[in-house]
Each structure stands twice: as structure tokens, then as C-alpha cells.
Amino acid sequence: MAASARRLIRDTLINTLPMAILLGISLRYADRPFPRWLKWITAILYGVFFAGELQAWWIPYVFGTTPDRTARYRAMFGKTHAFLPERNGIVPNTMHVVLHSATLAALLVALRLVTMTAADARQPAHGARMER
């Protein structure tokens, strides 16, 4: 197996396994409130995951990167759909823009869950009708 194929498999496992384990643990609590430790782990994992996305895509896109990374991204993603303009030799493809947007949304929800108090959880949603 070529080194690049091994690296791709390794990177995929590193990115997938923690989230798959988190999903499995979360499903155990689908019918009841998440314990506080699970809320924290969820927020931390999504924070780390999003930081990795920033480091892998958005920082190189905005500030530039090495010619090696630019060539690698072109080889892997050059023929995929993208709607953003190319900058510094890199253009995040549509799939990654959607993935990173979803990760950011999940991180914000996880942070809200961590900071939510029991009283907040009992409050009706803004605009929700209260029964009398």
C-alpha cells in the first residue's frame, strides 16, 4: 500500500472514530437528558474537530500554505465542485464548506448545552406558546 493511501486511511480514522464513538454514546441517552460530562465531551470534541478544519482548510485558504500542501489539495480536490474563488492556490470544495458549516453549528449547539442551566431548559423557546 502506498504511503499516501496509508496516510489517507489514517487521517480518515483519526477524524471518524472519535465522532462515531461520541454518536454511539449519545444514542444511549436519546430518551433522557445528556449528563453534564457528555455535554462537555461533545463540546470539546467538536471544538477540536473545528480547530482541525480551520487549520487544514481555512487558515491556508486565507493566509497561504506550502507548495506541497497546495499540490496535494489540487490532486485530491481539484476536480470537485467549488463555489468559492481560489486563494493562495487553494479552494475549499462545496462538500468541505458544508461539512465545516455543520461542524460549526454543532459546536455552537454543544456550547449552548454546556452553558444552559436547568432553569434555561425549562423555559419555553422564544415565540413558543405557553399552555394555560
Image: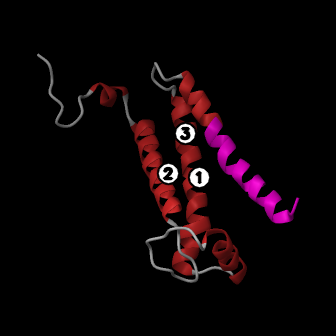
- Asked if 69 appears above or below 4 in the picture, the reply is below
Instruction: Name which residue type carries label 1.
Output: Phe
Highlighted magenta segment, given as a residue range: 1-20
Whether the magenta-drawn stretch holds residue 81 is answered as no
For marks 3 and 1 on the same chain, the one whose residue lies earlier in the sequence? 3
* Residue position marked by numbered label 2 in the rendering: 103
Which dot, 3 or 2, sits closer to the camera? 2
Q: How far apart are labels 2 and 1 at the CA level?
A: 8 Å
Name the residue tied to disc 1.
49
The residue under the point 70% across, 52% down is: 12
In which quadrant of the rendered image does the C terminus lie? top left
**Kind of element beneath mark 2:** helix
Is 19 a magenta residue? yes
Numbered circle sitting on residue 42: 3
Q: Residues within 10 Å of mark 2 (few under 14, many from 20)?
A: some
For badge 2, the amino acid type reads: Thr
Picture quadrant where residue 22 is located: top right
Which residue occupies the extreme right position in the image?
Answer: 1
Where does residue 118 sit, x and y in percent of width and height? 36, 26
Which badge, 2 or 1, is on the more N-terminal residue? Answer: 1
Q: Percent from the top left, x then y, of residue 9?
A: 76, 53
Element under disc 3: helix
Amino acid beneath label 3: Thr
Residue 18 location, quadrant = top right
Earlier-in-chain disc, 3 versus 2: 3
Q: Residue at x 70, y 74 (%)?
A: 72
Tags 2 and 1 touching, CB below 8 Å: yes
User: Which residue is drawn at the image coordinates 42% and 48% (left, top)?
Assistant: 108
In the image, residue 20 above or below residue 130: below
Residue 126, percent from left and from top? 20, 37
The residue nearer to you, when weighing 103 against 81, is 81
**Viewed as shown, does residue 125 lie left or right of 56?**
left
